[in-house]
Image: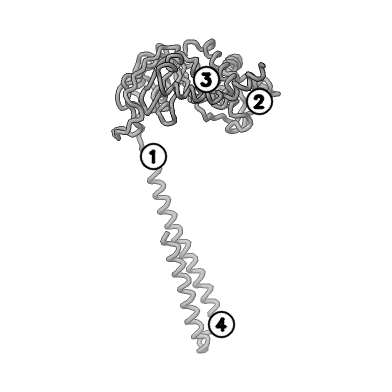
Amino acid sequence: ALNSPVMMFVIYSCIMLISWLGAKNVVAGTMTTGELSSVFTYVISAMMSLMMLSMIFVMISMSTASIRRISEILKETPDLHNGENPAKDMKDGSVDFNNVSFSYKHGSGKMVLNNIDLHIKSGETIGIIGSTGCGKTSLVNLISRLYDVDEGSVCVGGKDVRDYDMEYLRDQVSVVLQKNVLFSGTILDNLRWGNENATDAECIEACEAACADEFIERFPEKYETYIEQGGTNVSGGQKQRLCIARALLKKPKVLILDDSTSAVDTATDAKIRAAFAKSIPGTTKFIIAQRISSVQDADRIIVLDGGRVNGFDTHEKLVETNEIYREIYESQVKGGGDFDVQSSGKEEA
């Protein structure tokens, strides 16, 4: 930052000094105007060369700083790593949170989750609901071991997630996010990111389960339809259904839907959940949602509040016994419910 103004000060100071001395010599008759012009040309040329040389030194110092930072990243060792003999077999999709406490910065004392004790059977459908920032996504991220717990343990299939090979674990735990990523290529190409060896029949079956076949069949080229980078030529709801189908192709033991049907109307959302019950009955399903209609048919529902489990039961019992859940339920029902439900009701009428 200092280099440029210093060099400019030196150059213009030299020009002013030469102008003053040259003018005196021209007046005294010891120098001609042509000779003064030549001196200006030589001096400015020399000064510009020196300025460029100084810029090279600045670039070298910037490059050195960049190399040092890149080197720090390359030398960084991840906190998560496989054990000595990581397991590559998973009995089932049962999930157990054994007195789990978690913070993003270990040892900081700022717990995101506190004393979570949950036991979920394989094949169950579990809804998760709560206010923004209550720890819903943090809870499910522990299942695929994106982070390690501070206290307690998370077990999948009866084994601590830290005992599994991480690549194998994440193949068995499929996650579909609210904001999904599609790549440039055909629909089949995108689906096979979930399972590169999947047959056309398996891809079609997964799309039927995710209710994606409804719009794919309307495309002129059907499953060979080209998807632009980022999925810009399909809607948000269509992207979500394609990504759900892609996750189903992995045939996971655990499926996590993190608000991944937020852009889908409630009628289609209900069809997807009904299809899950038939197509993947043995897969444990976690559904994070803001809409009561998305979780009310789940086997059990977790109500999170401030990183703690405020309730864990069926929809009917939570409406009766849990104040937070009842408040969310009544606000959505008394507020008129979902627009899609009203619209479908009018159409039927």
The amino acid sitting under disc 3 is Ser
The answer to which of marks 4 and 1 sits earlier in the sequence is 4
Instruction: Quickly name the residue at label 4.
Output: 33
Q: Which residue is mark 2?
A: 225
Q: Is residue 306 visible?
A: yes
Compared to residue 121, the image places residue 257 above or below, namely below
Residue 171: name its quadrant: top left
Extreme residue in the front direction:
334
Q: Which residue is mark 1?
A: 73
- Amino acid bearing label 1: Ile
Helix, strand or loop at disc 3?
Answer: helix
Q: Does label 2 or label 1 sit earlier along the sequence?
A: 1
Residue sitting nearer the eye, 239 or 80: 239
Q: Earlier in the sequence, mark 3 or mark 2?
A: 2
Q: Nearer the viewer, residue 295 or 326?
A: 326
Element assignment for label 4: helix
User: Residue beneath label 3, please?
Assistant: 293
Q: Residue at x 40, y 29 (%)?
A: 134
Mark 4 to mark 2 CA distance (whole Å)? 76 Å
